[in-house]
Amino acid sequence: MEWSILIVLLIINGALGGQQLLNKIARASADRASGGNGSSKDQAHMPTSGMPEFTTAVVLAWWRELFKLAWSVAAVAIEAIKGRPWIEFWPGWAALLTVSICSFTGIIENFGFYIISRYSPHLWIPYISVYLLLLPIFTGLMFGSTVRKEHWIGTLLVMAGLAAASIRPDSLPQLTHAILKSEGAGHAHFATLQRLDLQAYIWLLIINLCLCSQQVLNNKSVQLATHKVSANAFVVWREIFKFGFASLFLGAIALFTSNGVSHYMKLNTAVVFALGAGLTGYIYSWGFFVLSKYPVHIWVPYTNLYVIAMPFLSVWLLPGVTVTLGQLLGTLFVGAGLFVGLSDYKHHKIERITDKQ
């Protein structure tokens, strides 16, 4: 594989790993600011009806998209100052329509990530790889891409890893035994969310469907562009729509529920972490569009390699986290599967979907 692709994949993995931890910390900070950690502070200001958790997710996503839009606009401005032709910032109406649809599923995905960040990241992050099963089907149908046996072998390893991470029966106590623990008990809100429940699995299903559409529609946007378009330009157009959708959701919550949205907007340190999430979000979005000239089933599996490090990062950076042997083995299986999925491409020329325009 070309070194330029590997470098972009490394950047994407770093940004995605940072993104998940920042989302977790921002969510915890927002909960503490609104009294969600069980203390009496600010409890009187908490809404008594409506959907407070979804409101928190929408507000955090709104701040994140605001900062992400700002970062991407700055990047496009730098490109324009350096002399990039203005035509390379306009993808055409068909590509723009595709980007708008991609943006809608993207904002739903962001809401889901903030909601599910109530749980320790190492518990659920391997499960966001399930959508990889669908990518070869869509890239084969929509782009006529070649799907090799290595991808399916890798996918089976990913599924085995997810199964190992989920094992809880009493007959296999060695897999449920804790082998890594955070120092200290941590905040009560963290300590009680070390196991996934039905709500978590529902949002994982939604996130997987959104992620699948994101990758395929990113590919389609690049293919539908009438000429060469800057990756930063694609990110800007996508963020314009995403920020618009986030604002619509925020306005709807303020209008149709009794939630105190103005109270939720004052999240103090959570906003700082949302700023960081906006930066990492811009970085990996740029990387996705840079690589979207290639079929997604070829390179997207490699963007999930950061899951291997997540159990260690969770224990190191977050309080009250426990990692079992089954979860650690599951993570390693997932990582092995992602590697195998691309193991034969050193012997084959990598296709470009832009060649099929």
Image: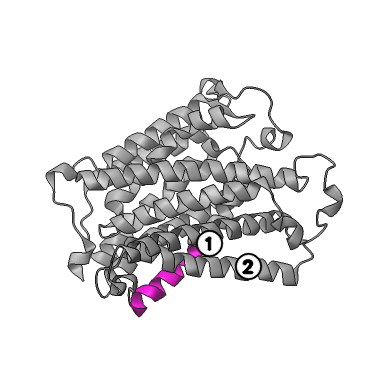
**Crowding near pointer 1: few (<14 within 10 Å), some, many (20+)?**
many
- The answer to whether marks 1 and 2 mark residues whose Cβ atoms lie closer than 8 Å is yes
Q: Amino acid at mark 1?
A: Ile
Q: Identify the residue at horizontal 33%, vertical 38% (top origin).
A: 337
Give left or right: position of 176 versus 357: right
As rendered, which of 299 and 195 lies closer to the eye? Answer: 299
As rendered, which of 266 and 347 lies closer to the eye? Answer: 266
Whether residue 38 is visible, yes or no, is yes
Choose the circle earlier in sequence order: 1 or 2. 1
Q: Which mark is residue 107?
A: 1
Which residue position holds label 2?
Answer: 249
Residue 271: where, in percent of width, then height?
63, 51
Residue 340 part of the magenta segment:
no
Q: Identify the residue at horizontal 50%, vertical 45% (top origin).
A: 19
Q: Identify the residue at horizontal 61%, vertical 68% (top origin).
A: 247
Q: Is residue 291 above or below residue 103?
A: above
Label 1 – label 2 distance at C-alpha:
10 Å
Q: Secondary structure at mark 1?
A: helix
**Crowding near pointer 2: few (<14 within 10 Å), some, many (20+)?**
some
Give left or right: position of 236 versus 322: left
Q: Identify the residue at horizontal 29%, vertical 68% (top origin).
A: 229
Q: Which mark is residue 52?
A: none
Give the magenta-colored segment's residue range: 92-107
